[in-house]
Image: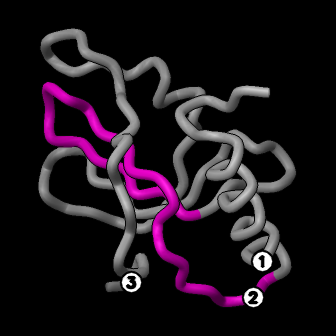
């Protein structure tokens, strides 16, 4: 099965982090995946997926105005976003987190 923007291994890690969050445990995970708009300044560092719908991701979101915030985003909605040159949201293939979300 193919998931939007993420590999199968990333999907499993995102879900595992999401299950911990859903259980009410406080965690500060490393982001699993980085998504961005190649022709704009928006970036999403995603750390977990809601285990109930698998479309709602949690992480650090910056829509390009320099004010990143922790929150949720729907992957299906990210799929419809394009930048000013009509380039879609893209997964950073080389991203490897070295810090947690709070750092």
47 or 76: which is nearer to us?
47
Above or below, 98 relative to 41:
below
Circles 2 and 1 in contact, beta carbons < 8 Å: yes
Q: Nearer the viewer, residue 102 or 3?
A: 3
Alpha-carbon neighbours of circle 2 within 10 Å: few (<14), some, or many (≥20)?
few
Q: Earlier in the sequence, mark 2 or mark 3?
A: 2
Kindly report the distance in space between the C-alpha atoms of the residues bearing marks 2 and 1: 6 Å
Is residue 34 a member of the stretch shown in magenta? Answer: yes
Is 1 or 57 nearer to us in this picture?
1
- Tell whether 19 sits left or right of 61: right
Residue range in magenta is 24-47
Please tell me which residue is depicted at 51% across the width and 60% down the height of the picture: 32
What is the CA distance from the residue labelled 1 to the residue labelled 3? 17 Å
Q: Secondary structure at mark 1?
A: helix
Task: Indicate the position of residue 33 as horizontal and vertical percent values.
Answer: 47, 53
Give the residue number, with chain letter if any, for mark 3.
102
Q: Secondary structure at mark 2?
A: loop
Quadrant containing the N terminus is: top right
Image point 54% across, 78% down: which residue? 29
């Amino acid at each position: 099965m193919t998931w939007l923007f993420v590999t199968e291994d990333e999907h499993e890690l995102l879900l595992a982090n999401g299950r911990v969050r859903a259980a009410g445990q406080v965690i500060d995970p490393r982001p699993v995946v980085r998504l961005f708009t190649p022709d704009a300044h928006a970036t999403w560092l995603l750390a977990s997926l809601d285990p109930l719908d698998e479309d709602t991701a949690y992480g650090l979101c910056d829509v390009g105005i320099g004010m990143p915030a922790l929150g949720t985003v729907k992957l299906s909605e990210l799929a419809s976003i394009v930048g000013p040159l009509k380039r879609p949201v893209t997964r950073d293939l080389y991203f490897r987190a070295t810090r947690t979300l709070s750092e």
